[in-house]
Image: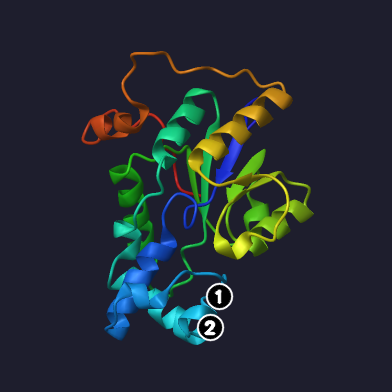
């Protein structure tokens, strides 16, 4: 996207609280209280007593039966920060690997788009794929250790969205969406991009998409699927 700063943003663990949503599903499937599962401290959920096969089985049920991608809690401040960055001239490109459940792609995509609309998350592109280095961006926000390492291996700038399972990774780190916003504005200034500020008194940015739902014009900051 020539002349425009593109920010590649992960969904699970960055915009949405995947751990909280999946904890509820696993607890329900095992007929236990969610608190019994404890904190997710590893990427593979071994601390919850599951191997790869069990994870795939439960995650498939979470997506297709519990509709986790439709009901996942949103991270505090995500919509507000992304709208402010969009107002500042940043092209928001959402990148997520949610199509690994066979025969469930229609539900995964539909629930993802509905969740984005319901939570007022702005975006220009929505990309569903696992190999994130294939998607070009000026900077990325991600929580998955393997994605961060793969992206950085290509020379990409990656902001680590803080989670217990990525604390050993060095470099730019965001413990909140306010931190993400600060890092991105700094990158914009370092690379010579003009920063457009939101004017006081304007409609709260996170409410704009809701105001356009049902309008024939459509929301201004949505794009097509990739």
Q: Is residue 127 above or below residue 194?
A: below
Q: Position of residue 111 (x, y in %)?
A: 32, 57
Label 1 crowd bin: few (<14), some (14–19), many (20+), radius 10 Å: some
17, 38: nearer the viewer: 38
Labels 2 and 1 touching (C-beta < 8 A): yes
Residue 223 relative to residue 188: left or right: left
Q: Which residue is mark 2?
A: 52
Quadrant of the image occupied by residue 73: bottom left
Q: Earlier in the sequence, mark 2 or mark 1?
A: 1
Query: Residue 116 location in percent, x, y?
Result: 36, 46
Residue at image location 35% in from the left, 60% down from the top: 69
**How many angstroms separate mark 2 from mark 1 (CA)?**
8 Å
Residue 195 quadrant: top right
Q: How many marks?
A: 2
Q: Which residue is mark 1?
A: 44
**In the displayed structure image, the side of residue 162 where residue 56 appears, left or right:** left
Q: Secondary structure at mark 2?
A: helix
């Amino acid at each position: 996207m020539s002349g425009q700063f593109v920010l590649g943003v992960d969904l699970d663990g960055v915009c949405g609280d995947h751990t909280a949503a999946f904890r509820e599903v696993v607890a329900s499937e095992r007929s236990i209280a969610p608190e019994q599962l404890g904190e997710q401290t590893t990427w593979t959920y071994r601390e919850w007593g599951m191997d790869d096969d069990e994870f795939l089985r439960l995650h498939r049920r979470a997506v297709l039966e519990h509709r986790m991608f439709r009901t996942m809690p949103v991270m505090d401040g995500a919509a507000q920060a992304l709208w402010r960055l969009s107002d500042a001239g940043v092209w928001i490109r959402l990148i997520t690997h949610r199509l690994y459940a066979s025969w469930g792609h229609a539900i995964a995509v539909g629930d993802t788009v509905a969740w984005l609309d319901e939570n007022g998350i702005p975006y220009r592109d929505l990309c569903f794929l696992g190999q994130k280095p294939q998607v070009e961006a000026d900077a990325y926000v991600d929580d998955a250790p393997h994605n961060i390492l793969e992206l950085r291996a290509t020379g990409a700038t990656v902001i680590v969205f803080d989670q217990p399972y990525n604390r050993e990774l060095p470099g730019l780190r965001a413990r909140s969406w306010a931190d993400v916003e600060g890092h991105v504005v700094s990158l914009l200034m370092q690379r010579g991009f003009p920063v457009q500020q939101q004017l006081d008194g304007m409609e709260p940015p996170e409410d704009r998409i809701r105001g356009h739902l049902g309008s024939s014009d459509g929301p201004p900051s949505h794009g097509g699927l990739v």
